[in-house]
Image (tube, rainbow, N blue to C red):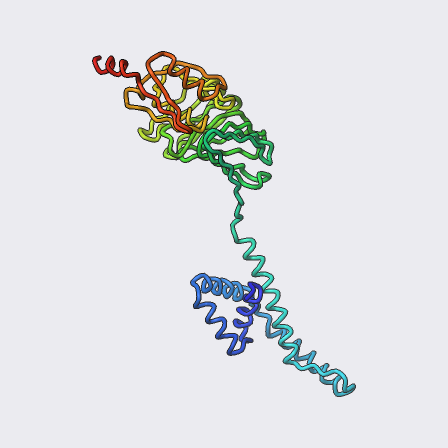
Amino acid sequence: MKEQELYLLITRYLSNQTSTEENEELADWIAADKRNEQTFEEVKRVWLGHKRPVDTESLRALAKLHAKISLDERKSGFLKIRLYDIYSLSAAALIILLVAGWFTYRQLSMPVQLEYQTVTTLSGQKKQFTLEDGTRVMLGPESTFSYPGSLKKGRRTVSIDGEAYFEVSKKPHQPFIVQTSSLTVQVLGTHFNINAGKNHTLSTVSLLEGKVKVKVREQVNEDYLLKPGEELSFNRVNHQIFQRSLDSASVLGWLNNILIFKNEELGLVVPRIEKMYGVRIILGDQATADTRLYAKFDNLPVSEVMKSICSSGMLTYRQDGNKIYINLKAEKKKDKHNH
């Protein structure tokens, strides 16, 4: 049964105009689902709210019309309209008006559902695109970005799981809001980077241009304002917050396949290498993971990166398809063990 036919049946039932078969059909429909019962009660409430106390006057007017029609009928013998037909037409017209009003009520009371689009990237993959409002987005490897199909009205709210760089179009009356698993970032028009995967320990917002307001979801009443050249990091494990100056070369290196390591442990930088090149790196042991790196790799193939990492003579590697195995050389293991 179509929705419009259903509402017409309900309103006819409420006006005592349904047959026994129709009453049974309506009862079966109501009993079939709890939501059907709720719909019936809502239509009933709208129907009762629209019943007017002028029905008696209307009936008197119809009676006068019937008397005139009866007189004309007796005179001419052509016009034959029964008062019952007029009542039925009036009731039908009222039902149609109420059904139309009910449809309008439903449309106005239903919340607007935005359709969201999703863009995802694999390891070793980046995607660049422009949103409807002119905002440019560069999505990093192993990331997911969701945004509404329309950004013309109200707040421009998007979400990111992973890393992305934004150049937000300036619309003073339409804040641009980026949501992550632990942070909410609000901007009007600016350039900034977000690295906030839901499985990452750190969620970081880095501001290159403009101004942003960052809210940590765990702190309902606290906002953090960033100036250009600053970044904020939230540690999901110990709940610490760091606000400091940023290194733009390190922050934006991934845009141009640049890796910068400043005295960092190999075990901590491996995920960045894996994401950029789409490989899987297996470290031999904890001693290998603890090896520190100080290097910059500017858009080099992964084989060159591995050769450079092992050029100090402490490490060795081998590649088997998509997997790369890195180990300490045997004599270096002995030295570390002796120390």
**Viewer-closest of 220 and 195:** 195
The C terminus sits in image quarter: top left
Residue 246 appears in the picture as rendered: no
- Left or right: residue 219 versus residue 168 is left
**Viewer-closest of 314 and 159:** 314
**Viewer-closest of 193 and 23:** 193
> In the picture, residue 183 is in which quadrant?
top left
The N terminus sits in image quarter: bottom right
- Left or right: residue 53 versus residue 202 is right
Residue located 28% across and 20% down the image = 287
Residue 195 placed where, x, y %? 44, 28
**Residue found at the very far left of the displayed protein:** 338
How many marks the image carries: the answer is 0
> In the picture, residue 273 is in which quadrant?
top left
Question: Up-down: is 259 above or below 48?
Answer: above
Residue 225 placed where, x, y %? 45, 25
> In the picture, residue 60 is in which quadrant?
bottom right
Residue 123 appears in the picture as rendered: yes
Question: Up-down: is 165 above or below 98?
Answer: above
Residue located 34% across and 16% down the image = 315
Residue located 53% across and 75% down the image = 16
Residue 81 placed where, x, y %? 70, 81
**Residue found at the very far right of the displayed protein:** 76
Residue 326 placed where, x, y %? 35, 22
**Viewer-closest of 213 and 335:** 335
